[in-house]
Image (cartoon, coloured by chain):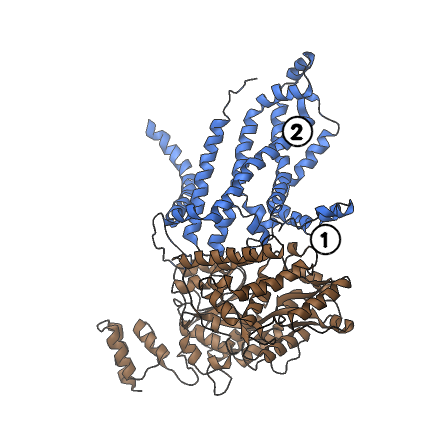
Chain colours: A blue, B brown
């Protein structure tokens, strides 16, 4: 009787499997093959060079520097974003002790999430513009002229100015995720804790955190993947892939882009892409393992 | 020529029974021209293509369709449509022209090159174009030697090459072969508002010392003497540094282009960097310049917040609509340093907007003919009137009244005479130009010393030189 089952399953599965094969598996396979060539991208000539590109990559200081920026983002982006999102979520939700106006803040803080990343980037590039930008204007207005700078070209500030944009635009999303899981915690838990003399902080630490752990874990993985990419905001906020700001905040994905589209080294760029793919997979596994905890049923 | 023998030769060439050398020998004996021979060896060209003459020096098949792709950017594309409709279309009414005016050519044309079906002629310019050095390295471009030697379309008694501004096609030569044809003549220099200068009683300084004195005076009056874009530091790197270095010691810039050992550590390089460093050390740049992109810096300049700005001749077209009434923009060469080998009038100029004829195109000779018609007095004059820019065709802009910027660029070229130049390393070795650009920004923001600049850029030059995967080029002074 089994073949009857397959007669039904296969027609349903086939279109999806076909699309997946053509648009996901095949490009991956191609990228891996191209990474073993010195393809320049302007002819069908793709000389096979074996693992040369990977070896060069290993010795390429500019790539390692770019990757180290991703490394810094990997620590800062999840930590800060989740800390802020959790704080907001707790203030607006926890155990029926939400602050006044919580509903209003929830909506307002979610706003940046509905603006496309490119628009966010362009808006903030104006905020950071030195002579007519909002940020320097405010600093000048409150007498802090000494702090005024060209945020997007100064090597000490450019990366963090862009990170701030990323955090601003994503906090709302994680806040909503945390609020949703916090709301599923029965308020009776908190009432019992208050009766036992728990402070607001200890109920957060001992009740909320363990019970929403799964959401935090997922968020860390999302943000880690974002930190390994981080291409769009750098290229848009800094004003282009070869601007001074982009050079000084160059992350691995932007380096990949420039190697392919600016320097016509498609083979090399593909090798960078493959390395980033492996790093992302590896990182996901590590985070999954490292954050595994007993889940509580309630 | 003996037509029967030519036909016999064509048949033999097609039969594939004879060696290429044998066919070439017989062709030479018949006195066939170079393009005809090339066509013959390919063995795929119709007989008509060999019908060369004064009217059709490149042996174009009058009925072959032509595929034209133009970068439609700052110059628009009316000048190209003019060639389609009023020149090529009239000379070869039976040729069907397929035309596209587009942006980001790389993304659209890359698949066509990879598939071996490129257009016949391309204006390969603008952001996101195809990398010309890569196209050359992959053998994707047709050798333009026969076009260069053909008679000019409407300049009597001159060859095509002779009818163009001297030196304007040098950057289209890769290791001795002409692959690119540059169309727009660009002058790079220091721009100022002549009305403002006259009002204050200033004259443009011819030496760097005078520039410093004048800058001090301007700064004292509450205006910034200089502004440039810190977001794209290649502006100051190329238009000021390259220009001053070339005038100080032309060989020093040639050595940089040729990746000579320690070229970036030459004393001439240090002299120029020291001069530039003064601009930042004495606070002559407009505050916040390091965060301004090119149009922002140009806007500040148009609003009178700074007096001097290094840009190219596209400036007026780029800023039209933001130019205040009474503003008289003019361009001048960089001021001279003590001991300069090139006089003050020498100016950085190059022809840009490169056109290419793909080697795998279906109508290679038609592509070349299209270029012969565009690069004519008629084509150049239309372009200048339409865009207020200079073309490389000599004498094509004579008598045109197109404002102060256009006039000053023409006058600057006239004054410079033979003394025009352009560095090549930004086209040949992008990694090197990138490093020089980044270090220039660091130095002008006092994050790197002059020596650190020289060390870092030299290190990159050595890396490029040692990298066997990067094709190398040579030039002479």
Residue B372 pos. (x, y %): 47, 77
x, y (%) of residue B132? Answer: 46, 64
Left or right: B257 with respect to B326?
A: left
Considering the numbered disc 2 on the image, is that residue within a helix, a strand or a loop?
helix
For this orientation, the residue located farthest to the top is A196
**For residue A268, which numbered disc appears in the image?**
none
Q: Looking at this view, is B333 or A208 the one in front?
A: B333
Q: Which residue is mark 1?
A: A132
The residue that disc 2 covers is A87
Q: In front: mark 2 or mark 1?
A: 1
Residue positioned 50% across, 49% down in the render: A255
Q: Does label 2 or label 1 sit earlier along the sequence?
A: 2
Pinpoint residue A273: horizontal percent, then vertical percent: 45, 45
| Left or right: where B328 falls relative to B100 | right
Write down the chain letter for disc 1.
Answer: A
> What's the residue at 60%, 72% (across, down)?
B338
For the N terminus of chain B, give its image quadrant: bottom left
């Amino acid at each position: 009787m089994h073949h009857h089952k397959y007669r039904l399953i296969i027609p349903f599965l086939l279109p999806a499997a076909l699309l997946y094969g053509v648009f996901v598996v095949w490009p991956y396979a191609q990228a891996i093959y191209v990474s073993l060539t010195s393809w320049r991208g302007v002819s069908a000539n793709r000389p096979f060079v074996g693992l040369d590109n990977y070896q060069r990559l290993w010795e390429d200081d500019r790539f390692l520097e770019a990757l180290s920026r991703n490394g810094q983002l990997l620590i800062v982006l999840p930590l800060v974003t989740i800390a802020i999102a959790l704080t907001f979520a707790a203030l607006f939700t926890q155990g029926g002790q939400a602050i006044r106006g919580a509903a209003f803040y929830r909506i307002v803080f979610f706003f940046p999430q509905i603006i496309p990343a490119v628009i966010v980037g362009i808006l903030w590039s104006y905020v950071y513009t030195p002579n007519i930008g909002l940020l320097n204007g405010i600093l000048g207005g409150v007498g802090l002229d000494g702090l005024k700078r060209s945020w997007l070209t100064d090597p000490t500030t450019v990366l963090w100015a862009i990170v701030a944009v990323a955090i601003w635009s994503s906090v709302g999303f994680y806040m909503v995720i945390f609020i949703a899981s916090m709301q599923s915690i029965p308020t009776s838990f908190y009432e019992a804790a208050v009766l036992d003399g728990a402070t607001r902080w200890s109920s957060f630490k001992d009740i909320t955190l363990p019970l929403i752990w799964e959401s935090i874990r997922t968020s860390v993985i999302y943000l880690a993947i974002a930190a390994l990419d981080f291409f769009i905001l750098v290229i848009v906020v800094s004003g282009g892939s070869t601007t001074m700001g982009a050079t000084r905040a160059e992350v691995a994905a932007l380096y990949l882009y420039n190697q392919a589209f600016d320097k016509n080294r498609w083979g090399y760029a593909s090798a960078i892409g493959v390395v980033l793919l492996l790093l992302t997979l590896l990182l996901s596994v590590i985070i999954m393992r490292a954050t595994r905890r007993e889940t509580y049923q309630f | 020529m003996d037509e029967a023998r030519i036909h016999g030769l064509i048949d033999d060439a097609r039969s594939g029974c004879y060696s290429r050398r044998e066919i070439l020998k017989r062709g030479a004996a018949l006195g066939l021209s170079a393009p005809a021979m090339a066509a013959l060896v390919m063995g795929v060209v119709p007989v008509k293509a060999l019908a060369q003459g004064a009217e059709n020096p490149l042996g174009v098949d009058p009925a072959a369709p032509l595929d034209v792709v133009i970068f439609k950017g700052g110059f628009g594309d009316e000048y190209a449509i003019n060639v389609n409709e009023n020149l090529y279309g009239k000379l070869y009414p039976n040729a069907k022209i397929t035309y596209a005016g587009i942006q980001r050519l790389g993304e659209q044309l890359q698949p066509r090159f990879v598939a071996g079906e490129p257009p016949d002629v391309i204006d390969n310019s603008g952001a996101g174009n195809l990398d010309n050095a890569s196209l050359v390295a992959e053998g994707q471009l047709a050798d333009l030697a026969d076009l260069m030697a053909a008679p000019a379309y409407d300049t009597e008694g001159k060859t095509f090459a002779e009818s163009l501004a001297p030196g304007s096609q040098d950057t289209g030569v890769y290791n001795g072969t002409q692959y690119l044809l540059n169309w727009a003549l660009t002058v790079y220099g220091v721009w100022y508002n002549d009305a403002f200068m006259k009002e204050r009683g200033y004259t443009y300084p011819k030496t760097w010392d005078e520039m410093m004195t004048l800058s001090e005076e301007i700064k004292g009056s509450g205006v910034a003497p200089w502004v440039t874009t810190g977001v794209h530091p290649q502006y100051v790197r190329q238009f000021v540094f390259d220009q001053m270095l070339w005038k100080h010691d032309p060989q020093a810039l040639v050595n940089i282009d040729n990746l000579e050992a320690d070229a970036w550590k030459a004393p001439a390089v240090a002299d120029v960097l020291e001069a530039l460093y003064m601009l930042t050390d004495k606070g002559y740049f407009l505050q916040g310049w390091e965060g301004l992109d090119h149009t922002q810096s140009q806007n500040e300049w148009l609003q009178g917040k700074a007096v001097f700005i290094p840009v190219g001749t596209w400036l007026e077209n780029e800023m039209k609509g933001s130019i205040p009434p009474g503003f008289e923009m003019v361009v001048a060469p960089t001021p001279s340093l003590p001991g300069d080998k090139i006089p003050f009038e020498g100016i950085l100029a190059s022809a840009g907007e490169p056109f290419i004829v793909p080697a795998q195109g279906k109508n290679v000779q038609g592509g070349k003919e299209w270029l012969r018609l565009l690069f004519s007095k008629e084509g150049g004059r239309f372009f200048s009137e339409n865009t207020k820019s200079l073309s490389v065709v000599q004498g094509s802009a004579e008598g045109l009244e197109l404002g102060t910027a256009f006039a000053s660029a023409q006058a600057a070229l006239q004054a410079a005479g033979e003394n025009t130049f352009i560095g090549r390393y930004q086209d040949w070795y992008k990694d090197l130009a990138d490093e020089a650009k980044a270090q220039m920004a660091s130095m002008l923001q006092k994050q790197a010393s002059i020596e650190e600049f020289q060390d870092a850029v030299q290190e990159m030059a050595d890396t490029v030189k040692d990298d066997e995967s990067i094709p190398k080029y040579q030039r002479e002074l």
